[in-house]
Image (spheres, grey):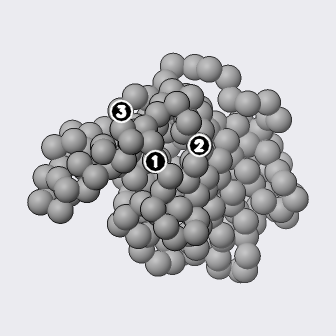
Amino acid sequence: LLAASLGIWVAGAAAVAAAPALAPREAALNGAWQLLTPAPKLLRSAGGGAPPLKAEGLQLYRQRQALLAKGDLSFDLSTRCKPIGFPRVLWDGGPFDIQLQRDLVFFGYTWNRNHRTAAFSDQPPKLQIPRYYGTSTAQWDGDTLVVETTNFHPGQRSERTTLSLTGKITERFTRISDKQMLYQFEIENSDAG
């Protein structure tokens, strides 16, 4: 189980009103966003310590960190125009766009023009073909948008570790000021290293 919090801010574009009109909480998240501060290069838990990885996952993480230190990206599928993984796309991919509609959330990423959607549902995501960004559902917890994602493609990485098919990422998007949103995520991956 991993968790992290990142602050992100509006990167220029104002929220665009959709037709039909959205409730204030939905309209508050529409627009272009970018990280306020760079994300840490090392994987950390919400408490700032090393993540609780199983032996196999820890070995893979250390191996990939050693390769990165040498400038070797041979393991990184993004060097072959594959998606850079999730949630890494939020901090390595440039600005990103959130557009809410009545029945779904659209996330557009600058990196390689990738996107994903999350249907509003109180049910867990339905199993589909594994995707690099997984299969997502969304719901509201007060004024916080909560997105749950599972069913990741085997090549997907989260901070350069591997998620299993049953791994889950839960994200929380909360508008905290006119130009800032708090982004939090938690990774649960009990079946993998």
Q: Which residue is mark 2?
A: 188
In depth, the one of 119 and 133 nearer the eye is 133
Q: Which marked residue is nearer to the observer: mark 1 or mark 3? A: 1
- Amino acid carrying mark 2 in the image: Glu
Who is closer to the viewer here, 192 or 164? 192
Image position of 55 with respect to 65: above or below: above
Q: Which one is earlier in the sequence, the residue at label 2 or at label 3?
A: 3
Horizontal side, residue 20 vs residue 80: left or right: right
Q: Is residue 55 above or below residue 87?
A: above
Quadrant placement of the C terminus? top left
Residue to which mark 1 is pinned: 53
- Name the element at disc 3: loop
Residue situated in front as seen by the camera: 124 or 9? 124
Q: Residues within 10 Å of mark 2 (few under 14, many from 20)?
A: some
The three-letter code of the residue at mark 3 reads Gly
Task: Determine which quarter of the picture holds residue 31.
Answer: bottom right
Mark nearest the camera among 2 and 1 is: 1
SS class, disc 1? loop
Task: Tell me which numbered mark, 2 or 1, is placed earlier along the sequence.
Answer: 1
**In the drawing, what numbered circle is on residue 155?**
3
Marks 3 and 1: in contact by CB < 8 Å? no
Q: Position of residue 94 (x, y in %)?
A: 40, 63
User: Which amino acid type corresponds to the residue marked 1 in the rendered image?
Assistant: Leu
Work out whether mark 1 precedes mark 3 in sequence or the reverse, and give the earlier one.
Answer: 1
Q: Residue furthest front?
A: 55
Give the x, y percent position of residue 149.
61, 38
